[in-house]
Image (cartoon, rainbow, N blue to C red):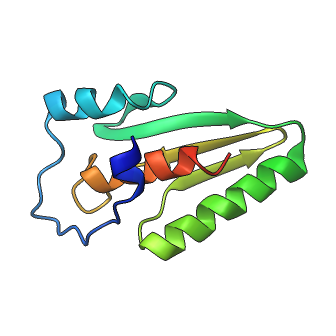
Amino acid sequence: MTQLENKHCVPCEGTAAPMASEELQRQLSSLPEWTLVDDSGTSKLVRVFTFKDFQSALDFTNRVGQLAEAEGHHPALLTEWGKVTVSWWTHAIGGIHLNDVIMATKTEKLV
């Protein structure tokens, strides 16, 4: 996981292919709390983070937002009392790119 947390997102054009299934499964082995979700045909990396209260969840949401802005790659975030659901995927390709795995890895470090 250390190698990915030091990488940065690269611009991804719509012509890039989603990450191959075997490579994705290999990468997910270092992100055991993340799940691969099929959302109407679009693969996404999803994790629910739990917190003691709403303010802690909101603070985490803001840290993820700052990371997303710095990397130029943005997740779907659902902030609720005591939890935040983070979903990473690459809109341009309708699936998961290495950028999403990089961002999931970096998101882990924000807790």
Which quadrant is home to the C terminus?
A: top right
Q: Nearer the viewer, residue 35 or 29?
A: 29
Asked if residue 40 is positioned above or below residue 72 in the image, the reply reads above
Looking at the rendered structure, the number of numbered marks drawn on it comes to 0
Tell me if 70 is positioned left or right of 25 in this view. right
Tell me if 13 is positioned left or right of 111 in this view. left
Tell me if 12 is positioned left or right of 86 in this view. left
Q: Nearer the viewer, residue 46 or 101?
A: 101
Which image quarter: residue 26? top left
Residue 101 visible in the current orientation: no
Which residue is most to the front?
2
Which residue is found at the position 43% from the left and 31% from the top? 31
Asked if residue 93 is positioned above or below residue 30 in the image, the reply reads below
The location of residue 98, given as percent across then percent down, is 26, 51
Which residue is found at the position 87% from the left and 47% from the top? 54
The location of residue 102, given as percent across then percent down, is 37, 52
Tell me if 65 is positioned left or right of 56 in this view. left
Which residue is found at the position 40% from the left and 46% from the top? 2
Which residue is found at the position 54% from the left and 50% from the top? 107
The location of residue 28, given as percent across then percent down, is 34, 30
Residue 80 visible in the current orientation: yes
Which quadrant is home to the N terminus?
A: top left
